[in-house]
Image (cartoon, rainbow, N blue to C red):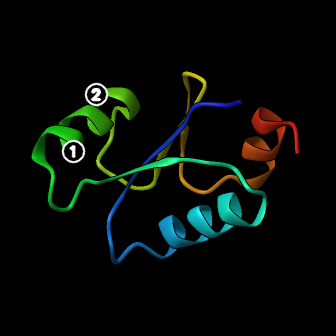
Amino acid sequence: MHKVEIYSTSTCHFCHLAKDFFKAHNVPFTDYNVGSDLEKRKEAVNKSGQMGVPVIVVDGNVVVGFDQDRLSNLLGI
């Protein structure tokens, strides 16, 4: 089982694409809304070094943006 976390906002198109991708492949994930959670926003910036979303962490590997090929590789799908 992979540990997947996504730092997102409710209005981010690529965040929705990433979450739909996880759901389509039955990948459980934890979603942090950085639009309303200041601590998680700071955490996302610390992990990624920038302010954009989504920031996705798969087993400690940080992926900035919705990079489907990289996510598939990290998840083995």
Disc 1 secondary structure class: helix
Relative to 61, is 71 on the left or the right? right
- Residue 2 higher or lower than 11, as above or below: above
Location of residue 22 in the rendering, given as x and y in whole percent from the top left corner: 67, 57
In this rendering, the answer to whether 67 lies above or below 24 is above
Q: Label 2 amino acid?
A: Asn
Give the amino acid at mark 1.
Arg
The mark that comes first in sequence, 2 or 1, is 1
Tag 2 secondary structure: helix
Q: Residues within 10 Å of mark 1 (few under 14, many from 20)?
A: many
Task: Tell me the number on the disc at residue 32.
Answer: none
Is 4 located above or below residue 21 in the figure? above
Q: Position of 75 compared to 17: left or right?
A: right
In this orientation, which residue lies closer to the viewer: 51 or 12?
12
Residue 54: percent from the left, percent from the top?
45, 54
Image quadrant occupied by the C terminus: top right
Foreground pick, 50 / 72: 72
* Residue at the (48%, 76%) spot, across then down: 13
Would you name the residue on which mark 2 appears?
46
Which quarter of the figure has residue 55? top left
Please state which of the two labelled residues, at mark 2 or mark 1, is closer to the viewer: 1
Q: Residue at x 86, y 36 (%)?
A: 76
Density class for disc 2 (Cα within 10 Å; few <14, some 14-19, many ≥20) is: few
Q: Are marks 2 and 1 in contact (CB under 8 Å)?
A: no
In this rendering, would 71 be left or right of 73?
left
Q: Which residue is mark 1?
A: 41
Q: Quadrant of residue 39?
A: top left
Quadrant position of the N terminus in the picture:
top right
